[in-house]
Image: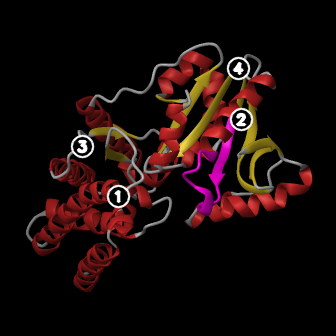
Protein backbone atom coordinates (compact mmCIF):
# COMPACT_ATOMS: atom_id res chain seq x y z
CA UNK A 1 0.00 0.00 0.00
CA UNK A 2 1.24 3.49 -0.92
CA UNK A 3 1.17 6.13 1.81
CA UNK A 4 1.95 9.76 0.90
CA UNK A 5 2.86 12.24 3.62
CA UNK A 6 4.78 15.45 4.19
CA UNK A 7 8.54 15.08 4.53
CA UNK A 8 10.07 15.61 7.96
CA UNK A 9 12.95 18.15 7.90
CA UNK A 10 15.34 15.47 9.19
CA UNK A 11 14.60 13.39 6.05
CA UNK A 12 15.76 16.04 3.56
CA UNK A 13 19.16 14.46 2.96
CA UNK A 14 17.66 11.00 2.47
CA UNK A 15 15.12 12.39 -0.01
CA UNK A 16 17.86 14.16 -1.99
CA UNK A 17 19.90 10.96 -2.24
CA UNK A 18 16.84 9.04 -3.43
CA UNK A 19 16.10 11.69 -6.05
CA UNK A 20 19.69 11.51 -7.30
CA UNK A 21 19.21 7.80 -8.03
CA UNK A 22 16.17 8.55 -10.17
CA UNK A 23 17.88 11.13 -12.42
CA UNK A 24 20.82 10.73 -14.76
CA UNK A 25 23.68 12.89 -15.98
CA UNK A 26 23.97 16.56 -15.10
CA UNK A 27 20.50 16.73 -13.56
CA UNK A 28 21.83 15.09 -10.42
CA UNK A 29 24.01 18.15 -9.74
CA UNK A 30 20.97 20.44 -9.54
CA UNK A 31 19.26 18.45 -6.78
CA UNK A 32 19.70 19.95 -3.32
CA UNK A 33 18.22 19.10 0.06
CA UNK A 34 14.54 20.08 -0.23
CA UNK A 35 12.97 22.57 2.15
CA UNK A 36 9.51 21.14 1.48
CA UNK A 37 8.45 17.85 -0.06
CA UNK A 38 5.92 15.06 0.02
CA UNK A 39 7.20 11.50 0.16
CA UNK A 40 5.67 8.15 -0.74
CA UNK A 41 6.17 5.18 1.56
CA UNK A 42 5.76 1.46 0.94
CA UNK A 43 6.40 -1.06 3.71
CA UNK A 44 7.73 1.74 5.91
CA UNK A 45 10.36 2.76 3.34
CA UNK A 46 10.53 6.04 1.37
CA UNK A 47 10.30 5.06 -2.31
CA UNK A 48 9.48 8.35 -4.02
CA UNK A 49 8.79 12.00 -3.54
CA UNK A 50 7.93 15.38 -4.98
CA UNK A 51 9.98 18.45 -4.06
CA UNK A 52 7.93 21.64 -3.86
CA UNK A 53 8.72 25.33 -4.30
CA UNK A 54 6.51 28.41 -4.49
CA UNK A 55 6.44 31.27 -7.01
CA UNK A 56 4.52 34.26 -5.66
CA UNK A 57 3.34 37.57 -7.10
CA UNK A 58 0.70 40.00 -5.90
CA UNK A 59 -1.93 38.19 -7.97
CA UNK A 60 -0.93 34.52 -7.69
CA UNK A 61 0.74 31.89 -5.58
CA UNK A 62 1.96 29.08 -7.84
CA UNK A 63 3.13 25.70 -6.58
CA UNK A 64 6.07 24.37 -8.57
CA UNK A 65 6.89 20.65 -8.78
CA UNK A 66 10.66 20.95 -8.63
CA UNK A 67 11.48 17.23 -8.85
CA UNK A 68 9.10 14.27 -8.99
CA UNK A 69 10.80 10.90 -8.62
CA UNK A 70 10.34 7.23 -7.82
CA UNK A 71 13.01 4.77 -6.77
CA UNK A 72 13.95 2.80 -9.93
CA UNK A 73 13.06 -0.50 -8.26
CA UNK A 74 9.52 0.68 -7.44
CA UNK A 75 8.51 2.22 -10.77
CA UNK A 76 5.29 1.05 -12.40
CA UNK A 77 3.43 0.61 -9.09
CA UNK A 78 1.31 3.80 -9.22
CA UNK A 79 3.61 5.80 -6.94
CA UNK A 80 3.96 8.71 -9.35
CA UNK A 81 0.20 9.05 -9.72
CA UNK A 82 -0.29 8.99 -5.96
CA UNK A 83 2.39 11.66 -5.49
CA UNK A 84 0.97 14.02 -8.14
CA UNK A 85 -2.60 13.68 -6.85
CA UNK A 86 -1.62 14.23 -3.22
CA UNK A 87 0.81 17.05 -4.01
CA UNK A 88 -1.79 18.90 -6.08
CA UNK A 89 -4.35 18.54 -3.28
CA UNK A 90 -1.75 19.75 -0.76
CA UNK A 91 -0.82 22.80 -2.87
CA UNK A 92 -4.48 23.83 -3.19
CA UNK A 93 -4.66 23.65 0.62
CA UNK A 94 -1.63 25.97 0.84
CA UNK A 95 -3.55 28.66 -1.05
CA UNK A 96 -2.00 28.13 -4.49
CA UNK A 97 -4.03 29.40 -7.44
CA UNK A 98 -2.05 27.27 -9.90
CA UNK A 99 0.51 24.46 -10.03
CA UNK A 100 3.18 23.94 -12.68
CA UNK A 101 6.13 21.78 -13.68
CA UNK A 102 8.87 21.71 -16.33
CA UNK A 103 9.36 18.28 -17.89
CA UNK A 104 11.84 16.96 -20.46
CA UNK A 105 10.34 16.24 -23.86
CA UNK A 106 11.58 12.66 -23.98
CA UNK A 107 10.53 11.87 -20.41
CA UNK A 108 7.27 10.62 -21.87
CA UNK A 109 6.30 8.66 -18.79
CA UNK A 110 6.46 11.77 -16.60
CA UNK A 111 4.56 14.15 -18.85
CA UNK A 112 1.95 11.50 -19.59
CA UNK A 113 1.51 11.18 -15.82
CA UNK A 114 0.92 14.92 -15.46
CA UNK A 115 -1.56 15.04 -18.35
CA UNK A 116 -3.47 12.04 -17.01
CA UNK A 117 -3.82 13.88 -13.70
CA UNK A 118 -5.06 17.20 -15.04
CA UNK A 119 -1.79 19.15 -15.40
CA UNK A 120 -1.72 20.15 -19.07
CA UNK A 121 1.15 20.93 -21.41
CA UNK A 122 0.69 24.63 -22.22
CA UNK A 123 2.16 27.32 -24.43
CA UNK A 124 3.77 30.41 -22.96
CA UNK A 125 0.89 32.48 -24.32
CA UNK A 126 -1.62 30.34 -22.42
CA UNK A 127 0.44 30.80 -19.25
CA UNK A 128 0.32 34.58 -19.72
CA UNK A 129 -3.40 34.46 -20.45
CA UNK A 130 -4.15 32.45 -17.30
CA UNK A 131 -1.73 34.00 -14.83
CA UNK A 132 -0.73 37.37 -16.26
CA UNK A 133 2.57 38.53 -17.71
CA UNK A 134 4.39 39.14 -14.42
CA UNK A 135 3.60 35.69 -12.99
CA UNK A 136 4.44 34.02 -16.31
CA UNK A 137 7.81 35.80 -16.43
CA UNK A 138 8.55 34.82 -12.85
CA UNK A 139 7.76 31.18 -13.64
CA UNK A 140 10.01 31.39 -16.70
CA UNK A 141 13.05 32.90 -14.96
CA UNK A 142 12.66 31.60 -11.38
CA UNK A 143 12.58 27.98 -12.52
CA UNK A 144 15.10 26.18 -14.77
CA UNK A 145 12.70 26.58 -17.70
CA UNK A 146 14.51 29.56 -19.28
CA UNK A 147 17.70 27.49 -19.66
CA UNK A 148 16.22 23.97 -19.93
CA UNK A 149 16.55 23.07 -23.58
CA UNK A 150 14.06 20.39 -24.56
CA UNK A 151 11.58 21.00 -21.74
CA UNK A 152 7.91 21.90 -21.78
CA UNK A 153 5.79 23.75 -19.23
CA UNK A 154 2.83 21.98 -17.59
CA UNK A 155 0.12 23.92 -15.77
CA UNK A 156 -3.13 23.49 -13.87
CA UNK A 157 -5.23 26.37 -12.54
CA UNK A 158 -7.49 25.85 -9.54
CA UNK A 159 -11.18 25.61 -10.42
CA UNK A 160 -10.51 26.37 -14.07
CA UNK A 161 -9.32 24.61 -17.23
CA UNK A 162 -6.30 25.54 -19.30
CA UNK A 163 -6.03 25.08 -23.04
CA UNK A 164 -3.49 22.34 -23.88
CA UNK A 165 -0.75 23.13 -26.34
CA UNK A 166 -1.76 22.51 -29.95
CA UNK A 167 -0.46 19.40 -31.72
CA UNK A 168 -0.85 20.86 -35.24
CA UNK A 169 2.26 19.35 -36.84
CA UNK A 170 2.57 21.79 -39.74
CA UNK A 171 2.33 24.85 -37.50
CA UNK A 172 4.69 23.34 -34.92
CA UNK A 173 7.33 22.67 -37.61
CA UNK A 174 6.98 26.24 -38.87
CA UNK A 175 7.32 27.63 -35.33
CA UNK A 176 10.35 25.40 -34.70
CA UNK A 177 12.19 26.68 -37.77
CA UNK A 178 11.14 30.28 -37.16
CA UNK A 179 12.17 30.21 -33.48
CA UNK A 180 15.62 28.86 -34.29
CA UNK A 181 16.10 31.35 -37.11
CA UNK A 182 15.20 34.27 -34.84
CA UNK A 183 17.51 33.04 -32.08
CA UNK A 184 20.41 32.77 -34.53
CA UNK A 185 19.82 36.37 -35.62
CA UNK A 186 21.20 37.47 -32.26
CA UNK A 187 24.64 36.50 -33.58
CA UNK A 188 24.32 38.34 -36.89
CA UNK A 189 27.27 40.67 -36.23
CA UNK A 190 29.63 38.00 -34.94
CA UNK A 191 29.75 35.82 -38.06
CA UNK A 192 30.75 36.46 -41.67
CA UNK A 193 28.51 34.91 -44.35
CA UNK A 194 25.77 34.83 -41.73
CA UNK A 195 22.91 34.12 -44.12
CA UNK A 196 24.79 31.19 -45.64
CA UNK A 197 25.30 29.89 -42.10
CA UNK A 198 21.58 30.41 -41.33
CA UNK A 199 20.58 28.60 -44.53
CA UNK A 200 22.83 25.67 -43.59
CA UNK A 201 21.31 25.40 -40.11
CA UNK A 202 17.74 25.50 -41.40
CA UNK A 203 18.54 23.01 -44.16
CA UNK A 204 19.90 20.52 -41.63
CA UNK A 205 16.99 21.04 -39.23
CA UNK A 206 14.39 20.66 -41.97
CA UNK A 207 16.17 17.63 -43.41
CA UNK A 208 16.20 15.97 -39.98
CA UNK A 209 12.46 16.62 -39.62
CA UNK A 210 11.84 14.95 -43.00
CA UNK A 211 14.08 12.00 -42.10
CA UNK A 212 12.29 11.62 -38.77
CA UNK A 213 8.96 11.59 -40.59
CA UNK A 214 10.21 8.73 -42.76
CA UNK A 215 11.08 6.95 -39.53
CA UNK A 216 7.53 7.39 -38.23
CA UNK A 217 6.21 5.61 -41.32
CA UNK A 218 8.16 2.52 -40.23
CA UNK A 219 6.08 2.31 -37.04
CA UNK A 220 2.39 1.67 -36.39
CA UNK A 221 1.82 4.90 -34.46
CA UNK A 222 0.35 8.17 -35.75
CA UNK A 223 3.00 10.69 -34.72
CA UNK A 224 2.91 14.47 -34.33
CA UNK A 225 5.69 17.06 -34.28
CA UNK A 226 6.15 19.52 -31.44
CA UNK A 227 8.44 22.44 -30.64
CA UNK A 228 9.57 22.48 -27.00
CA UNK A 229 9.41 25.94 -25.44
CA UNK A 230 12.16 25.56 -22.84
CA UNK A 231 15.70 26.84 -23.12
CA UNK A 232 15.14 29.76 -25.52
CA UNK A 233 17.23 32.10 -23.36
CA UNK A 234 20.34 29.90 -23.32
CA UNK A 235 19.94 29.15 -27.04
CA UNK A 236 19.86 32.91 -27.71
CA UNK A 237 22.98 33.49 -25.59
CA UNK A 238 24.91 30.81 -27.50
CA UNK A 239 23.66 32.26 -30.77
CA UNK A 240 24.74 35.75 -29.68
CA UNK A 241 28.37 34.62 -29.32
CA UNK A 242 28.29 32.98 -32.74
CA UNK A 243 27.50 29.37 -31.78
CA UNK A 244 24.54 27.17 -32.55
CA UNK A 245 22.45 25.35 -29.96
CA UNK A 246 18.98 24.83 -31.45
CA UNK A 247 15.77 24.68 -29.51
CA UNK A 248 14.36 21.17 -29.49
CA UNK A 249 11.66 19.90 -31.78
CA UNK A 250 10.75 16.20 -31.99
CA UNK A 251 8.31 13.67 -33.33
CA UNK A 252 6.13 12.16 -30.59
CA UNK A 253 3.78 9.17 -30.48
CA UNK A 254 0.23 9.70 -29.19
CA UNK A 255 0.69 7.72 -25.97
CA UNK A 256 3.34 6.33 -23.68
CA UNK A 257 3.97 2.62 -23.35
CA UNK A 258 6.57 1.10 -21.06
CA UNK A 259 7.54 -1.55 -23.60
CA UNK A 260 10.50 -2.52 -25.77
CA UNK A 261 8.34 -1.77 -28.80
CA UNK A 262 7.88 1.82 -27.66
CA UNK A 263 11.64 2.24 -27.21
CA UNK A 264 12.17 0.73 -30.67
CA UNK A 265 9.75 3.16 -32.31
CA UNK A 266 11.34 6.16 -30.58
CA UNK A 267 14.79 4.86 -31.54
CA UNK A 268 13.89 4.28 -35.20
CA UNK A 269 12.76 7.88 -35.64
CA UNK A 270 15.90 9.25 -33.98
CA UNK A 271 18.12 6.87 -35.99
CA UNK A 272 16.67 8.11 -39.28
CA UNK A 273 17.40 11.70 -38.23
CA UNK A 274 20.96 10.74 -37.25
CA UNK A 275 21.56 8.93 -40.57
CA UNK A 276 20.44 12.02 -42.47
CA UNK A 277 22.76 14.21 -40.40
CA UNK A 278 25.72 11.92 -41.12
CA UNK A 279 25.03 11.89 -44.87
CA UNK A 280 24.50 15.66 -45.05
CA UNK A 281 27.59 16.42 -42.95
CA UNK A 282 29.76 14.05 -44.97
CA UNK A 283 28.57 15.70 -48.19
CA UNK A 284 29.45 19.07 -46.71
CA UNK A 285 32.91 17.90 -45.67
CA UNK A 286 33.67 16.46 -49.11
CA UNK A 287 32.39 19.52 -51.03
CA UNK A 288 33.35 22.35 -48.70
CA UNK A 289 36.28 23.48 -50.84
CA UNK A 290 33.98 24.09 -53.80
CA UNK A 291 30.97 25.83 -52.24
CA UNK A 292 30.59 28.16 -49.25
CA UNK A 293 27.19 26.64 -48.48
CA UNK A 294 28.67 23.15 -48.12
CA UNK A 295 31.42 24.55 -45.92
CA UNK A 296 28.69 25.86 -43.61
CA UNK A 297 26.89 22.48 -43.78
CA UNK A 298 30.11 20.75 -42.70
CA UNK A 299 30.67 23.19 -39.84
CA UNK A 300 27.14 22.98 -38.44
CA UNK A 301 26.68 19.29 -39.19
CA UNK A 302 29.75 18.33 -37.16
CA UNK A 303 28.36 20.26 -34.19
CA UNK A 304 25.00 18.51 -34.52
CA UNK A 305 26.71 15.10 -34.70
CA UNK A 306 28.50 15.87 -31.44
CA UNK A 307 25.21 16.83 -29.81
CA UNK A 308 23.57 13.60 -31.00
CA UNK A 309 26.43 11.47 -29.65
CA UNK A 310 26.06 12.84 -26.10
CA UNK A 311 23.33 10.78 -24.38
CA UNK A 312 22.80 12.84 -21.23
CA UNK A 313 21.04 16.10 -20.48
CA UNK A 314 21.02 18.77 -21.94
CA UNK A 315 22.01 16.99 -25.18
CA UNK A 316 19.90 13.83 -24.92
CA UNK A 317 16.90 15.53 -26.53
CA UNK A 318 18.83 15.78 -29.82
CA UNK A 319 18.04 12.10 -30.33
CA UNK A 320 21.07 10.09 -29.30
CA UNK A 321 19.47 8.95 -26.07
CA UNK A 322 16.50 7.50 -27.94
CA UNK A 323 18.87 5.34 -30.01
CA UNK A 324 20.87 4.31 -26.92
CA UNK A 325 17.74 3.26 -25.01
CA UNK A 326 16.62 1.17 -27.97
CA UNK A 327 19.85 -0.45 -29.19
CA UNK A 328 23.27 0.11 -27.62
CA UNK A 329 25.06 -1.50 -30.56
CA UNK A 330 23.49 0.88 -33.08
CA UNK A 331 24.22 3.81 -30.80
CA UNK A 332 27.90 2.81 -30.60
CA UNK A 333 28.08 2.41 -34.39
CA UNK A 334 26.50 5.80 -35.07
CA UNK A 335 28.79 7.45 -32.53
CA UNK A 336 31.89 5.90 -34.11
CA UNK A 337 30.82 7.02 -37.59
CA UNK A 338 30.15 10.53 -36.27
CA UNK A 339 33.58 10.64 -34.59
CA UNK A 340 35.28 9.50 -37.82
CA UNK A 341 33.64 12.34 -39.74
CA UNK A 342 34.60 14.76 -36.98
CA UNK A 343 38.23 13.57 -37.06
CA UNK A 344 38.35 13.80 -40.86
CA UNK A 345 36.97 17.34 -40.80
CA UNK A 346 39.54 18.24 -38.14
CA UNK A 347 42.43 16.97 -40.28
CA UNK A 348 41.22 19.04 -43.24
CA UNK A 349 41.26 22.20 -41.15
Q: Which region of the structure is painted magenta?
A: 64-79
User: From the viewer's perspective, is 165 left or right of 53?
Assistant: left
Please tell me the numbered disc located at residue 87.
2
Left or right of 228 on screen, residue 26: right
> Which quarter of the picture shows residue 18?
bottom right
Residue 88 appears left or right of 168:
right
Is residue 244 in view?
no
* Horizontal relation, residue 263 to residue 348: left or right: right
- Near mark 2 (Cα within 10 A), the count class, few <14, some 14-19 or many ≥20, is many
Q: Secondary structure at mark 3?
A: loop
What is the basis of the colouring in this image?
A: secondary structure
Residue 208 at what x, y percent from top left? 22, 53
Measuring 39% from the left and 65% from the top, which residue is drawn there?
Answer: 325
| Residue indicated by mark 3 | 221
> Label 2's element?
helix
Instruction: Examine the rendered structure and indicate whether residue 169 appears above or below residue 244.
Output: above
Q: Nearer the viewer, mark 4 or mark 1?
A: 1
Name the disc covering residue 97, or none: 4
Q: Which residue is mark 1?
A: 263
Q: Which numbered disc, 2 or 4, marks the residue that appears first in the sequence?
A: 2
Tell which circle, 1 or 3, labels the residue nearer the N-terminal end.
Answer: 3
Amino acid sequence: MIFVRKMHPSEAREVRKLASKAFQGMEQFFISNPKEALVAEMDGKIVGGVMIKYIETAAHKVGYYDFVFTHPQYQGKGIGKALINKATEYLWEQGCTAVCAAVKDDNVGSWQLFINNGVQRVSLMETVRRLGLLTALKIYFFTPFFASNGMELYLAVKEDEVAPKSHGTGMQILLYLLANALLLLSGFRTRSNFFVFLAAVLTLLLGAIAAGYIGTLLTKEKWHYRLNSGGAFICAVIGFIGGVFPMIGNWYPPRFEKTDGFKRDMGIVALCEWIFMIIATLAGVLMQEQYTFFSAIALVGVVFLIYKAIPFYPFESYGGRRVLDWNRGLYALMTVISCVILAYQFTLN
